Every structure is written in C-alpha cells, then in structure tokens.
Image (spheres, rainbow, N blue to C red):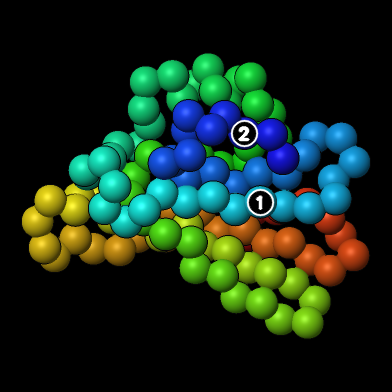
Amino acid sequence: MSRPTTRSSSDFAGALASPVVGTELVSSSITSGGDGSEKQNGSDTVLAENPHIRFHNNRRGYVSTRFTADRMEAEFKVVPFVKQPGAPVQTRGRFVTEDRRPGLRPV
C-alpha cells in the first residue's frame, strides 16, 4: 500500500487498487496530537489522490482486531477527546479481510 507518511498519525484502512495482495491497517496513537477531529486540513485531497484508502478519521484511537482461521475483523475505535478523563470509546469503522479473498471490506 502506498500512503502518505506525513499522515501517519491519522487512522487509515486501505487496500491496493490493482491486484490486491494484502491489507494494511494504520492507526493513530490514543493521545498523540491532542483531541483530534473528524478530518484534518487536506484530508479530502489526500483521499482523492489515494483511492486505495478505504477509511480515514483524524480522531485519537486504536484498532481492535480479531483473527479466526478464515478472516480478520478490524474495528477502528476512537474517542472524542483525550485532554480530560472519561471520554466514551466509539467504533468509527468496521472492516473484514477474508481468507483467499484479498481486500478490505466494510462490515
């Protein structure tokens, strides 16, 4: 997958546009860069220039994954704020990659 390294602190889930051979999941650190936002300046341009990106969110969070013999499920968990305690954890995106069926699909 080709992704802009300057955006590595954002949440991405992507698969290649030409023969898909794998999937990369990227997430921000739960507290890096303050509270975050739904989008950041330039997000629309980055997404338009990178059609292989399946999901983007600039909130702070993490990826929770579950593996079975035939699939991998990923949930992108985010919090609306990190500067104070008590932020509720929300699932912002859910995806699956299945054995022998390359690519990332929303659930």
Image quadrant assignment for residue 101? bottom right
At 30% across and 63% down in the image, what residue appears?
Answer: 89
The crowding category of the residue bearing disc 1, from other C-alpha atoms within 10 Å (few below 14, some 14 to 19, many at least 20), is: some
Horizontal and vertical percent position of residue 69: 78, 82
Image quadrant assignment for residue 50? top right
- Image position of 10 with respect to 86: above or below: above
Residue farthest bottom in this picture: 69
In front of the other: 38 or 85:
85
Query: What kind of residue is marked 1?
Result: Glu
At 60% across and 53% down in the image, what residue appears?
Answer: 25
Horizontal and vertical percent position of residue 74: 58, 64
The quarter of the rendered structure image containing the N terminus is top right
Please give the residue where the numbered disc 2 appears in the rendered image.
Answer: 3
Q: Which mark is residue 24?
A: 1
Query: What kind of residue is marked 2?
Result: Arg
Image quadrant assignment for residue 49? top right
Horizontal and vertical percent position of residue 46: 54, 23
